[in-house]
Image: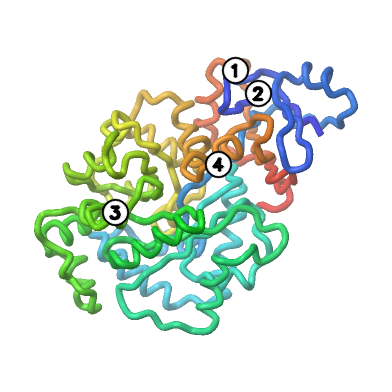
Amino acid sequence: MIYRARHLVTMDGPPVEDGAVLVRGENVAAAGRWADLRREFPGEGMADLGEVVLLPGFVNPHCHLDYSTLRHAILPPRSFSEWVGRINALKRTLDPADYLAAIAKGFRESARWGTTSLLNIEAFPELMWKMPAPPLRTWWFYEMIDVRSAVATEELVAGALLFFQEPAADGWLGGRGLSPHAPYTASPELYRLARDCARTRGLPWTTHLGESADEREMFVQGRGPLYDFLARLGRPMDDCGGGRSAMARLAAGGCLGPECIAVHLNDWQPEDFALVAPGGPLAGMTVVHCPLSHRYFRHSPFPYETLRELTINLCIGTDSPASNGSFSLLEELRAFAAVFPGLEERELLATITRNPASALGLQGRIGCIRPGAWADLAAFPISATNSCNIHAEVVACRAPAAWIMVHGRVVFPGSSE
C-alpha cells in the first residue's frame, strides 16, 4: 500500500512535498514523491492521508507507564526526597488491576501524540503475564532495586524470568532490558550484575543518574534529606561522602559503560564531563533529558551546550506522569526549546527519532523512513503551504496525531482516545 501525505519528513533526508511511503508487510519498501511512487509501483493500492505531515513514529526513550494514573497526584515538592516519599506512599495504595489500567492508559495517550516506540521502566514485571500484546513497540526494562532486602514471591520471580525468555505471546514488539534504578537504590554489585548480564545477552540497559541536588549532596558530601531518608531505611551509606559524584563512583568501580542509556543527569560535577568526553571511559553514552519533569522539580539548569560540544547522543523523554502531565514528546520539545532558543527544529526532532534509535542500536529500523525500516509511522494534521520550514511546523503542532501505523498495522484511529 502507498500512503500519500501533503508533506513527508523522513529524518533521513530533506522533506518531500506531496510525498508518499510504500509499505509492504511490516517494512517500508520505498519513500519519495507521490508521483514517482505511483509510476514506479503501478499495481500497489493507494491511500491518501490528506493534508498531513507524515513522519517516522516518535520514540520515547524513557517513561513509567505504571504511573499513568498519577497525573497531578503530587504537588511540586520542596525537595526530590519529599517526592520520593510521597510516590512510595501512593504506590502502596495501588493493586495490580490499577497498574494494568495505568499501562493501558499510557499506551493510549502515547499513541495519541504520535509515539510508536517507547522504553518503559517496569517495576512489576509479573504484570506482563496478565496483559495482551501491547499496541506499541515497547522495550520493557526490569527495574532493579536492592536498597532493602527484596521479598521474593513465586509470581515476582516468574515475572523477572520473563525478561530472559522468548516473548510471552505473538504480537509483542520491541524487547526487554535491565534497569538498576539509581545509585541511591541499587548497589554497585547490582549495577555490575545488570551491566554484565545485558552485555552477555545483548540487552539494552538504562539507569537514573545525576537525578537531583539531593543525590549530589548524598554522594559528594555524605549528608542531606536523601541521605537521611535512605539511612533510616537501612541502606548502607559507606559509599557516600568524600567529594565524588555517583557517576564517578560507578565509573571507577566498573559499573557503567558507554552503552548505558543514562536518564536525567540533571546535576553534574566537573569530573563527570571528562567521563563522557571523547576518549573518556563513558564516551558514547546516551543521555535522556526530560524537560517537563526537570521543570517540575526546579532542578539546576541542564548543561545542554556542554553536552553538545562533547557530541553526546541526547534524547528527550517524558518520564513519569507523576512529575509530568503529558505523554506528548512534542510538548517536551517545546519546553526544551523554550530554555534553549535558537535550536534547529530538525535537531530537536532527532532527539525523539534518530537519537533514541541509535541508543538502541536500531539505526535505520526505527526513527526514520527509508527502505528496510519498520513501518512505524505517524501523521499530524499540518497543511503548511511549503516544506521549507516543515520541521518547525511539526514541533509547534499541538493537535493529536491523525493517523498511526506500527509494524505495518494501522493502530490509530481506533486504539486511542
Q: Which residue is mark 4?
A: 362
Q: Earlier in the sequence, mark 2 or mark 1?
A: 2
Tag 4 and tag 3, C-beta contact below 8 Å? no
Q: Secondary structure at mark 2?
A: strand
Q: Nearer the viewer, residue 153 or 197?
A: 197
Distance between the alpha carbons at the discs numbered 4 and 1: 27 Å
- Residue type, label 3: Glu
> Is residue 7 shown left or right of residue 355?
right
Disc on res. 7 = 2
Q: Secondary structure at mark 3?
A: loop
Classed neighbour count for the residue bearing mark 4: other residues with Cα under 10 Å, few (<14), some (14–19), many (≥20) = some
Q: Secondary structure at mark 1?
A: loop
Disc on res. 5 = none
Distance between the alpha carbons at the discs numbered 3 and 1: 39 Å
User: Of circles 3 and 2, which is in front?
Assistant: 3
The answer to whether one can see residue 289 in this image is: no
> Is residue 111 shown left or right of residue 310?
right
Distance between the alpha carbons at the discs numbered 2 and 1: 7 Å
- Residue type, label 1: Ser
